[in-house]
Image (cartoon, helix red, strand yellow):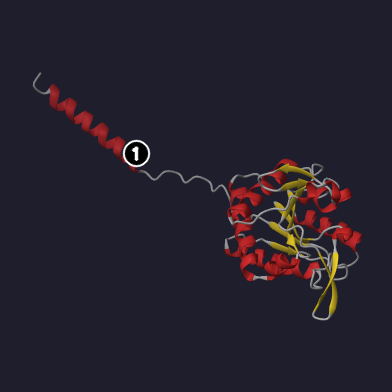
Amino acid sequence: MKLAFPIFALLAAAAVASAGIADARPAKPAAPACDRPTFRVILDVGHTAQEPGAVSARGVPEYDFNLRLARRIAAALVKAGFAHTVLLLTDGAAQPALLARVQRANAMQAQLFVSIHHDSVPEFLLAAWEFLGADGRFSDRFKGHALFVSRDNARFRQSLAFAQLLGRALKSHRLEYTPHYTLKLMGPRRRLLVDARAGVYRFDQLVVLKDARMPAVLLEAGSIVNRAEELSMESPERQALIAAAMVEAVEKFCAAGRQ
């Protein structure tokens, strides 16, 4: 009977030691939620050199703004670890270029497609002015960015999710979206606002949004016919804010596994 307690104690100690050894084994690492090096983002530079889109208040083609901003965003994404970021440039006339860019994007099998643009307004809202001896057209009535998604995109829910992430990230950087697409005066360019906090609109029939086989969003980064905002859009500071917001949104989208 005197040996019972010591034997029991030894057995208990051995069990505790064994458990301790088991607990000390390194836990199997969880699979990463976002594999940044393999996550492919396509940054579509809106319009082409031949069909440059809108013209700014000071006579600069929209395509120039689109290319500068897209390059800034691409550099920020690569720096953040998204090494497979692709800058998509297209040549030629407008309609063939639209079809070509979406075909190329689909062939790349990317996880996200973002088209970079800068905004204008309908012709009847533009007024004449002179800048450095040249005639120009402007409208200071509206400013701000806008985001567009297509309900006809096969990944509409994911497209909307990313647009919401980007809209909130832009807002966190104190950038406001423009509400003018909700106004009757926009006529055929009027759009349905689907997220009033993030500034997300529907543009169902836009080719690059509806025909992309991946989540797709179009960003109108700001109004280049607004004379003050045009200068802001040219600044490295504004471009850096937009690029930072894009990186933040892509990181969250990738980590959530929504692609």
Q: Is 104 displayed left or right of 7 in the figure?
A: right
Q: Is 134 displayed left or right of 24 in the figure?
A: right
Residue 67 percent location from the top left of the image? 74, 68
Q: Is 90 displayed left or right of 79 in the figure?
A: right
Residue in the image at 69% along x and 44% along y:
196
Vertical arrangement, residue 31 with respect to residue 108, above or below: above
Residue that carries the numbered disc 1 in the rendered image: 22
Number of numbered labels in the structure image: 1
Report helix, strand or loop for mark 1. Answer: helix
Residue in the image at 89% along x and 59% along y:
124
- The answer, for residue 231, to whether it is visible in the render is yes
Vertical arrangement, residue 5 with respect to residue 123, above or below: above
Q: Quadrant of residue 142?
A: bottom right
Residue in the image at 64% along x and 65% along y:
238
Seen as rendered, the residue at the extreme top is 1
Vertical arrangement, residue 228 with respect to residue 208, above or below: below
Seen as rendered, the residue at the extreme left is 2
Residue 71 percent location from the top left of the image? 69, 68
Residue 25 percent location from the top left of the image? 36, 43
Q: Quadrant of the N terminus?
A: top left
Q: Amino acid at mark 1?
A: Ala
- The answer, for residue 110, to whether it is visible in the render is no
Give the class, few, some or many, for how many residues have Cα within 10 Å of label 1's Cα (few <14, many ≥20). few
